[in-house]
Amino acid sequence: MNRPSEFTIQDLLPDIHSQFTIYEGGPVGKENLYFVHRVPYLIPNSIAVSNGIYWGGNFNALKKLLVNNILNATEIRFFLGYSGWSERQLKDEIQTDSWFVSENDFKNIFSVNDETLWKNKLLQKGGKYKLWANAPGDINLN
């Protein structure tokens, strides 16, 4: 959710003059554009994910909203690619401490600070995770 790419919507869809940032979604399906949002009443066929967050929907409706500059960055976020796991893979990775689970305690995940999200979550988790809070994004720079 917090790793902006070098691309904007206009880079990927030149006929839409919009500067929404495209975020890194994950290593799978990087040739596809995905989006999550909070405006299902503007984007038909959206799928409820959790607590007022929706995935996808009618792309033609989305294009009209973008062309008419109706959406803002606190309502929608775009991603190239996604993260995916095989059956039980994520559960197994969580059990081996490859991941940690954190509740979404943001009122609006679309307006979190990209620069500090990960660090703040690690500090909030505490314990052994505090050590990683100041690690650089590129561990090779450490």
Image: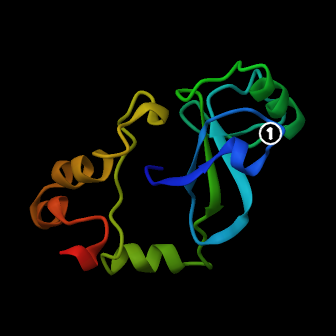
Image quadrant in which the C terminus is located: bottom left
Name which residue lies at 36% across and 59% down.
101
Image check: 48 left or right of 133? right
Image check: 100 left or right of 37? left
Indicate the position of residue 32 as horizontal and vertical percent values.
Answer: 75, 60
* Dot 1 amino acid type: Gly
Q: Which residue is mark 1?
A: 57
Q: Judge whether 104 appears above or below 99 on screen.
A: above
Image check: 45 left or right of 118? right
Indicate the position of residue 89 as horizontal and vertical percent values.
Answer: 52, 80
User: In terms of secondary structure, where does tag 1 sit?
Assistant: loop
On the image, which quarter does residue 36 sit in?
A: top right
Q: Which of the pair 129/134 is nearer the observer?
A: 134
Indicate the position of residue 27 as horizontal and vertical percent values.
Answer: 59, 72
Colour mapping used in the image:
rainbow
Name which residue lies at 49% across and 34% down.
110
